[in-house]
Structure formats: structure tokens, C-alpha cells
Image: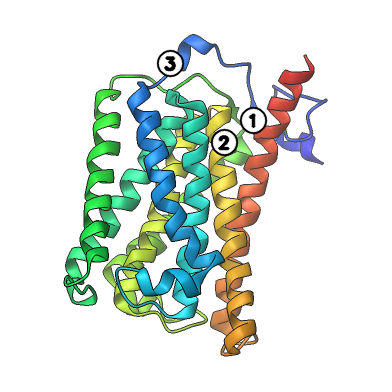
Amino acid sequence: MWWIFAGRNRHYDDPWAFIYAGYPMPTSDNPPFPGTLRLFSLVVIIVLTVGAGLFFAPVLVKPRWPWAVTPFNARFLGGFYTAEMVVMAALLFWNRWSPGRLVLVMALIFTVIVSVASFINLGYFNFGRKAPWLWFLVYLGSVAASGLFLWRARARPSAKGVTLQPAWRGYMPVELAVLGLYGVGLLLFPLTFGSFWPWPVDGFHAQVYSAIFLAGAGGIYVVWRSAPREELLVLGLAQLLVGLLAIVGLVITDAAVNRIDWTATGTLCWLALFAWIGISGVFKLFAATQYFSSQSAS
């Protein structure tokens, strides 16, 4: 019944046409970023491999992390940094206004909020070690770099992309509102909004996690207003990885420590939240890959 949502611009050979309708994007509408952004992306990817190590090798990375992290917090953070590393790899690969606009907006939101949360919670850092100094240097540098690239490109219109169908345009503001409001809740009332998580989440970690939800909301807003296919692909991939790795990380960690009550209402709500994020990413991902496949075939 997907054709019900297709409207007047139906694409009968495309099962994902309920998400978009439109035509190929001219290259002239999607100019490249300067090569310095590619260098910035490469540096960020190298730094993010350390964060990803919290997921794949927490025993090695946890002692070197800027603050003390519990097993569940370590694996959750590592999963997100893995997703972020993949997103930055997409920017390194394309290095164009699309998906650069999306990636830089999400990166700016995330790094600003994490920086603010870190300054509010300085007591978590032992500045007798090098790691906290590097943490602030990396995050403040990322804020400055991503903000600078966006500022210099502020006059550019969005790359010409797809026209979202009414059903999809009606869904995305709901997605934006849920992620945005929950992110604001975690930031302003961290203990209250983090109380249902499967493991105990202190105020600092809850505020750091708020950046994940708010960055996602920012990305959805960018794509909702204008949806170049590269941005649909990157956003879908990011959501899929965030949802999948959060759940997989919880399962792996609990297999070692056995502390999660899998029947608790809070745990089920948490699982539903991240499953929804991942599934939403799958829909965006398939929509984008379907387009690229059709372009290759033609």
C-alpha cells in the first residue's frame, strides 16, 4: 500500500517513493568544500578511533579516558563515537556542501553541548593528567572548525535534492520533536530524564548524552527542510548505527556484568527508543541507496 503515500509524483518502479519524489541533483548545486575540511575530517576520524575503542576494547581505553566511566557508559559512548566516525568518513569521502552541511551542523551541536557539559562538571576531570586537557582542546577546536566552515558557507542555498512526500514530511517533525525535547530534558534535568535508563546515569553523563539527541534533532531539521540524497544516506546511516550499537553494547556489557533487569519498564522504554531511532535510520538509508542504485543502472 506504499502507493497511497506517493501523491501525484509516483515512482512505480521505486518501492521507497513514499519518502521522496524528485530528480537528480546537478553537480553545480553541490560545490566542494576546501581541501582543509578534508584534512579536518581526517584528524577528527583519527581522534574518534580512540572513542570507538570504548566499544571494541574498553579494557584498553577506559584507563586513558579523561574521566572515570562505568562499563555501560563506556560501551554506550564507544558506540556513538563509532557512528560519528563513520559519519565523518562520509564527509571525508564526499567533501561537498551536501552532505557536509548536515555533518557540520550535527558536529557543531554535539561539540558545543558536550563542551558546555564538561565545563559545568569540571569536578569529573583530573587535570593532573594529560587526557582532560586534550579533551577540552579537541572539543573546543572542533567547535571552532565546524563553526568556521559553516559560517563561511552560510550564504549557500541547500543543494537541490528530493521533494519529501506529505506522509514523510508529517513524520519528520514528530521525530525532530521527540529527539529534541528529550535532549533538552536530559540537558536541563539530567537526573529526571535519565532515570529510566537500564543502568544508573549520573548528571554529567546524562548531559553528555543529551548532545546525541540534540545533534540528531538538528540533522533531522536540516534534512526535513531540504533533502539531498547524500544527506538522507548519511543521516540514515548515523541513526542506524546509533540505535544498533546502543542496543548491542547493552547486551554485550550485561553479558559480562549481569546487572540489567530486562523486564523493567524503563529498560523496555529505552530499548524501544533506540530501536525506533535505528529503524528510522533504515528507512532513510534504503531511500537514499535506492536512488544511488537507480542512478548507477541508468
Mark 1 residue type: Tyr
Q: Of label 1 and label 2, which has the lower sequence position? A: 1
Q: Which mark is residue 232?
A: 2
Number of on-image labels: 3
Which residue occupies 51% across, 55% down? 82
285 left or right of 16 in image: left
Q: Are marks 1 and 2 in contact (CB under 8 Å)?
A: yes
- Give the Cα distance between marks 3 and 2: 18 Å
Q: Nearer the viewer, mark 1 or mark 3?
A: 3
Mark 3 residue type: Pro
Q: Quadrant of residue 218?
A: top left
Q: Nearer the viewer, mark 3 or mark 2?
A: 3
| Residue 40: image location, x then y, percent | 35, 36
Mark 2 residue type: Leu
Q: Which mark is residue 20?
A: 1
Residue 141 appears in the rendering: yes
* 10 Å crowding of disc 2: few (<14), some (14-19), many (20+): many
Which residue occupies 68% across, 36% down? 287
Q: Is residue 89 above or below residue 270?
A: above
